[in-house]
Amino acid sequence: MTVPIPSAKPTAGDTGPTISIAVGDNGLTVAWPDRSWTFHPIWLREQSRDPAARDRKIGQRLYDAWRLAPDLSVTAAALDGDIVSLTFSDGHAARYPLDFLRREHEQTVPDDLAGTPRPWDATLTPLPTLLWSEVMASDRALLTLADTLAVHGFCILDQGPTGVDDAEHLANRFGPVRRTNWGGVADVKVEAVAVDLTQTNRGLEPHADNPYRLPAPGYILLHCLRNDAEGGESTLVDGLQVAETIRREDPAAFEVLTTTATRFRYVDPETVLEHHGPLIELAPDGAVRRLRFNNRTEEAPALAPDRLSAYYAARRRYAQLLHAPGNTLEFKLEPGQLLFIDNYRLLHGRRGYALDNGGRHMRQAYLDRDCVASRQKVLRRALDAEPDLWGALT
C-alpha cells in the first residue's frame, strides 16, 4: 500500500513546480514534475547523516550497515519545502534535501570529472585553449581547465614558459605527478639508444598511453620545448565519438569490443609491464568509460578461432575510424604550449618528422584521474557555492 504525503503549503507568490512524496511497502516515492522514483528504505537509512549514524566532521559511517533489519521500513514522512523528513521502523529519524535525492537517482555510479562529455570530430573549432599564466595564477581558470577536460577531453595551454620543470609546476596545480619507470617528467625526443618508439622520429598511430599499467595514467601533459623539425604535427581522435559510432552502426562489433579482453605488454631491460582489458570499456550503466588502443604493445590472447575472427574484424573497424581523417584533429604545438589530454577518452599520435634542419623536444608528465576530479569538485564547491549535500542530511 502507498500512502501519499501532502507537501508543505506553498509560500505566497510561489509558482514553482509541484513535488509530492508517498510512502509504500517498498520505500519512499518522490514525484517530480518530469519523473518519479522509489527509494529503498535501507538505502535511505544508509544515507542518513544524523550524528548517531555518521561522524559529523569526517562523514564516515559509524555503524555496520549490513546489520540493518532486512524488513526495515519507512514509518513516517513529511515534506517541508525542499526537505523530506523520515522516520524508520528502527526508530531512526533523518532529513533529506530533495536535490540530494534527485542527484542520487540520476547518478547511479560514481562519476569522474563532473560535466557532460561532448563528442567531436575533425570539424571541432576553435580548439579549446586557455592561457598558461591564468591557469597557474587563478583557481577559477584551473576550474575552467577541469571543466573543459570533462567536455572535450583535452585543452591546449598557450603562451607558457619553456623550462624543463614547468610541466611539473603546472601539474602540481592538480596534484602530484604520477611517477612511472620513466620517472616523474620525461623527455619525448629522439634518443641515440631508444627503448620505446616515442624515442624515435617515426610517426605514431592514434593510441592510449600505457594500457599495460594498472592503473594506466589518467591524464597526459605534453609540453612543447622545441618543434621546428619538418613534420611532427600532433593528432587527436575522440574515442568517445568513435565508440558511439560503432555502437550505433555496428552493434555486433560493439559487443565484441566491449566484452573481449585483450592484453598489453611493455618490456625493456629493466621493466616488464602487463595488463589486460577490452578496447572499449563500459561503466555499469552502459556509458563508455575508457578507450584502449595501442598497436605497439597489444598482444591478443590465443582465444578460440571464431572469437578471434570476430575480434579482429571488430578491431579493424575500430582502427579504421581512429585513423579516419574526418575524426582526426591535426595541429603543430609551438614552444611554450602544453597539450592536456584525457588518456581514457582520447587517442593521440604524431606525424613523423625529419631532423635535418630542426628538432622536436617535448616534456611529458602524467596525472592520476582521482586527483584531477577531486580538485575540480573542491573548486566547484568553493567557487560556485555548490551545496555540501554530504553534510546536509541531518
Image (spheres, grey):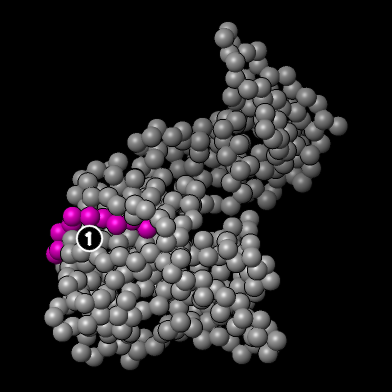
User: Residue at 27% across / 75% down in the picture?
Assistant: 232
Number of residue marks: 1
Q: Secondary structure at mark 1?
A: loop
Question: Callout 1 environment at 10 Å: few (<14), some (14 to 19), or many (20+)?
Answer: many
Given the current orientation, which residue lies at the most extreme top position? 12
The answer to whether one can see residue 231 in this image is: yes
Q: Is residue 262 left or right of residue 270?
A: right
Q: Is residue 223 visible?
A: no
Name the residue: 46% across, 82% down.
295
Residue drawn 30% across the image and 41% down it = 140
Of all residues, the one furthest to the right in this rendering is 1
Q: Is residue 287 above or below residue 102?
A: below
Q: Looking at the image, which is closer to me, 392 or 260? A: 260
Up-down relation of residue 177 to residue 129 (above or below):
below
Q: Which residues are magenta?
A: 154-163
Residue type of the residue flagged with mark 1: Gln
Q: Nearer the viewer, residue 14 or 104?
A: 14
Percent across and percent down for residue 115 are 47, 47
Percent x, y for residue 204?
A: 36, 79
Q: Which quarter shows the N terminus?
A: top right
Q: Is residue 159 magenta?
A: yes
Q: For mark 1, what is the residue?
A: 337
Residue 100: percent from the left, percent from the top?
57, 36
